[in-house]
Amino acid sequence: KNSFNDLVDYQQCLHFAKDDYAMYWGTDEVFMMVYAAGNRHYVGSTYNFMGDIYFKMLDAFHAGNIEKLNTVQGEANSIYKIMNDYNSLIAGKEIMRHIGVDCGPVRRPLKNLKAAESTSLLDRLQKTSFFDFAVREKSLKI
């Protein structure tokens, strides 16, 4: 898994690997960039609760609808920004708990969000398209 954001280096690795090696990408924020470069293997932290957003990106990409792709990427960017404001790892666990999958506390030295911080995170996400997708995923009860 590569989470180093040197896209030129990663693309060279993809070219070298061809079909002999699976190169896994781990930075969700540039999912579409590496997809367009040929990557098909991902390990990310937001796919658990933002899967529909990524499928919308893929649909737009394959339809050649770059305007729609940019709109959906912008939605994802808004969500990433909010998560980063609360530490993405901590925010991700809180989001999972909120949609019905309690993954337990964060590991030390990180600290779970306090109730007011959790409320603030969820309120800010409410102003994005996040819950358009997360509510549907929550109802799946996988």
Image (tube, rainbow, N blue to C red):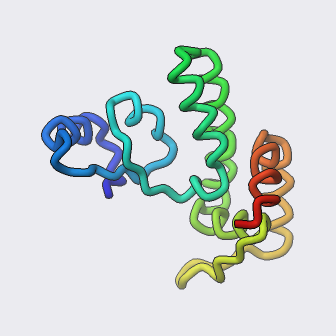
Query: Looking at the picture, how far across and down is residue 100, in whole percent?
Result: 77, 70
For residue 16, side relative to residue 44 (left or right): left
Q: Is residue 63 left or right of residue 26?
A: right
Q: Which image quadrant: the N terminus? A: bottom left
Q: Image point 13% across, 40% down: which residue?
A: 16
Q: Is residue 17 left or right of residue 131?
A: left
Residue 123, how many percent across, how many down? 86, 54
Q: Nearer the viewer, residue 76 or 63?
A: 63
106 over 31 or under it: above or below: below
Residue 62: image location, x then y, percent: 51, 22
Above or below, 92 relative to 37: below
Q: Residue 63 versus residue 24: which sits nearer the camera?
A: 63
Quadrant hosting residue 122: bottom right
Q: Residue at x 61, y 58 (%)?
A: 48
Rendered-image quadrant of the C terminus: bottom right
Instruction: Note whether 69 is above or below 2 in the view shown.
Output: above
Q: Does residue 35 appear to the left or right of 72 in the view shown?
A: left
| Residue 10, percent from left and from top | 26, 41
Residue ID at (33%, 30%): 37
